[in-house]
Amino acid sequence: MSPMPTLFIPHGGGPCFFMEWNPPDTWDRHRAFLEALPASLPVKPKALLVISGHWEAQEFTVQSNPAPSLLFDYAGFPPSTYEIFWPAPGDPALANRVSRLLKDAGFDAGTDSKRGFDHGVFVPLKVAFPNAGIPTVQLSLRGDLDPEAHLKAGQALAPLRDEGVLIIGSGNTYHNMAVLMRSMHGGAGGAIAGLDFDRWLSEAVTHPDPAQRNAMLANWAQAPGAREANPREEHLIPLHVVAGAAGADRGVKTLEDHVMGAVESAFRFG
């Protein structure tokens, strides 16, 4: 079996794919990208390992719940968005494997048998895998959000790719909520926010030398427009895990969408 690729996907805003927007095509490109994801894979994954920007823990923590519920960790949206159903099974054996790989690499790592799927998992994956038939495990970010540590954690998890596990980072390349909220309420106009950082990030991810790519990502905060795009980096750091797991595989940009006045991109390795 060829190794599974690793993916960084933008998960949009809240339950964005399951509500009405004005204009109505606001999230169409994001949705089409996610819907096409399964057909882009070499084979059907045996399991999904998802790192979401919405779970941080003191140490890397793996969800070991065999039947995760959904965590509706958003507020102020239509009642129907709190009735979303995505009953993907967990995979305690995979959770233990993830924990062991991290520990063998020198990380403190724990498991959480009660954790459900946050919206960084179930919102995009309900679009990509609506039948919810693939076992899915979530891995937390480490609370310090250290980019080098997350690259190294990804490197530790790379063997999973040869075991049929699809490693997905779920976040956003642009996550300045103040700008996005102004746009949502009609206050944005003119230039698309985040283009300088997106150009730099695309150059970093697609760099032909994986060592140079990882060095650039480790120092992402020095890039043009970095802190304007990500005042706090929790939505970007899942990218570091999947880049670390990519090994020598070169990254490619698979989506660039201009939505809510900002740019959001997706990347694939392998």
Image (spheres, grey):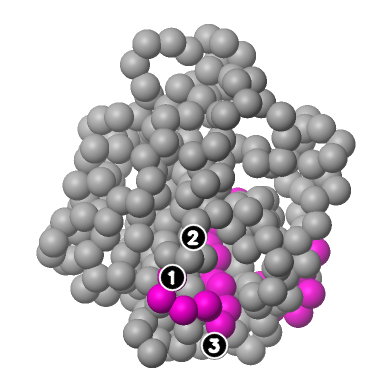
- Magenta stretch bounds: 41-69
Residue beneath disc 1: 41
In this rendering, the answer to whether 146 lies above or below 104 is above
What element does badge 3 sit on? helix
Asked whether residue 18 is in view, the answer is yes
In this rendering, the answer to whether 103 lies above or below 200 is below
Residue, x 54% and y 72% (percent of image)? 49
Which of the 4 image quadrants contains residue 69?
A: bottom right
Q: Amino acid at mark 3?
A: Arg
Residue beneath disc 3: 97
Where is residue 79 drawn, in percent x and y?
Answer: 86, 36
Residues at marks 2 and 3 touching, judged by CB atoms closer than 8 Å: no
Residue, x 80% and y 51% (percent of image)? 84
> Nearer the N terminus, badge 1 or badge 3?
1
Between circles 1 and 3, the one closer to the viewer is 1
Q: Amino acid at mark 1?
A: Leu
Where is residue 155 drawn, in percent x and y?
Answer: 34, 75
Residues at marks 1 and 2 touching, judged by CB atoms closer than 8 Å: yes
> Nearer the N terminus, badge 2 or badge 3?
2
Q: CA distance from mark 1 to mark 3?
A: 23 Å
Q: Is residue 45 magenta?
A: yes
Q: Amino acid at mark 2?
A: Leu
Where is residue 170 drawn, in percent x and y?
Answer: 51, 55
The C terminus - image quarter? bottom left
Between circles 2 and 3, the one closer to the viewer is 2
Q: Is residue 191 left or right of residue 50?
A: left
Q: CA distance from mark 1 to mark 2?
A: 7 Å
